[in-house]
Amino acid sequence: MSDALAAIALMLSLALPLGLALLWALPTARAAVGRVATWAPLPALLLALFTEPGPSVSLDWILLGTRLGLTETTRVFLLFTAVLWLGAGMYARGYLHDDPRRPRFELFWLLTLAGNLGLILALDAATFYASFALMTFAAYGLVVHTGRPDALRAGRIYLVMAVLGEALLLAGLLLAAGLTDAPLLPLLAELPAAVAGATHRDMIVALLWLGFGIKAGLPLLHLWLPLAHPVAPVPASAVLSGAMIKAGLLGWLHTLPLGLLSLPAWGTLAIVAGLIAAFGAAFLALHQQHPKTVLAYSSISQMGLITVGVGAALYLPELWPLLGPAIALYAFHHGLAKGALFLGVGIARHPGGLARPWLWLLLALPALSLTGLMTSGVLAKLELKYAIDAARDAPAWWPQLPFWLALAAAGTTLIMARYLWLLRSESKGDTAPDTMWWGWGIVLAGSLMLVFLLPVQGLDEPAVRGVKDLIGLTWPVLAGTLLALAGARWLRPWPIPPGDLLALLPPVGQAIARLWRRTVSASKHAARRVQVLRRQSRQRSGRLFRPDRLWQREAGIVFAAVLAAALGTALL
């Protein structure tokens, strides 16, 4: 694609969803907007497929000046994001065909899409942050779409976490931007070096790590994910987990000093947090009763594995040339595979006349890919493993990382078994609209085949390098399968409410409230007792030490004594 066409595609990628959202304000245009909204990601998809990284567009009249363009990394993100939004948008046309709230959904859909594409295409920090915020707050409308009490509760928690994340993120970006040559309009490419040389580097890294970590589902910051996914419509859940959660990862890649200097403490923290997310979320997923909640925890687990890669790059910056492409490939793999799994929930509910063996085969394909047995899953896991194995002068525990990553694949297998097990009771027997099948088919095909067409240098397809690699890919899946069969036979999961830690807040809050009431009651009783004692003390002290009061009480006796003394004196 020529530079002129690339510039047009860059502007259309944002102008089309934003323009359609503006047209939605005209009631007479809403029906047409709904028909066109499905195709809003198409310019971005064409841009990702046919444009080489390099061309950029400067729009000086927007904000403080907006620059849009593509790098090798953002091109990968744009490709899977555009495919997923296109397939999910087509799916939504059928999924919401008789929903009276569909026009409102389409407005928030377009705004969220514009924000998601904008943060990928942004080359400057201001545009990136504005797009990130637009995506974050517009997605609230997708989460609370049904208006049910559980959706409104999930929306409140989502907003609380979103505001916290935006505050941390804004503080971190402002501190980092202030250290660049152009603090009012810093380029994203300038931020890592600015952070690396900052006097208060750890504080800036902490703000950026936590601010983006809320979106990426870090442990203790993940609470919104398992609540938002079950209540949102299926196509919204697909883009929430497949595309929007990667915005946090992309923020890390844009701002952290990856490849510039070694940060052992932060690297260790990231690796530990990633492993906790990988295994902790897998454990929680096995105790869920809804397939979309299982997939939400699966996303937290998979993002934990990607976080391990980010932590490895923070610890050993010399690995960044290998880890950078591996992380981008893993994000691509997870985005489309998880999107296909989410959209598969609606297909399983409305399979129509499709024979059940074929249906389950199609549903199992992205699950097998996520475990690392097929296409993009094989490539992503091998690329990450090879990058970690390339370390030199690593700490003593470093060689154990590939084993823990493989063990996490066994956990992924258990999660996928739980997901498929719960899907068996979802079928309602009717047939899904054709657009749902087409949308699911686009994302499913993309998750299996599009990885071989990635037009990005540095993501060469890694081949299995021997029997050892083949065994490393298969034993976790076999172990997970055996554990799943044994668990289905002898174990029964106990339900853990979605949001896990949030479920502890009501009883803990009630206990604190009871303790507070007892404390306040005891304090009031003690205060009343003190007042009584003080009053009694004043009364006693008045009787003993207040001669003026004595005069008032015994005035007659005193007057008589004085009179007697005067008479005695006169007689004498």
Image (spheres, rainbow, N blue to C red):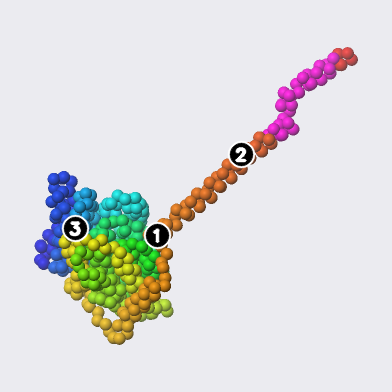
Q: Residue at x 38, y 67 (%)?
A: 286
Q: Mark 3 vs mark 2: which is more N-terminal? A: 3
Q: Is residue 434 left or right of residue 237?
A: left
Identify which amino acid the numbered label 1 is placed on. Pro
Quick one: label 1 or label 2, which is nearer the N terminus?
1
Give how far across and how far down residue 509 sits, in percent.
47, 52
Instruction: Determine if the magenta segment contains residue 89.
Output: no
Q: Quadrant of residue 266?
A: bottom left
Query: Is the residue 201 above or below the residue 523 in the image?
Result: below
Q: Secondary structure at mark 1?
A: loop
Q: Is residue 387 left or right of residue 355?
A: right
Q: Are marks 3 and 2 in contact (CB under 8 Å)?
A: no
The answer, for residue 468, to whether it is visible in the render is yes
Q: Circle 3 — which element?
A: helix
Q: Which mark is residue 497?
A: 1
- Label 1 – label 3 distance at C-alpha: 30 Å
Q: Which quarter of the image is occupied by the N terminus? A: bottom left
Residue 94's disc is 3
Q: Quadrant of the C terminus?
A: top right
Disc 3 versus disc 2: distance between alpha carbons?
68 Å
Q: Which mark is residue 528?
A: 2
Residue 5 lies left or right of residue 137; in this view the side is: left
Tell which tag, 1 or 2, sits nearer the viewer.
Answer: 1
Q: Position of residue 554 (x, y in %)?
A: 76, 23
Who is closer to the viewer here, 82 or 460?
82
Furthest residue in direction bottom, as rendered: 467
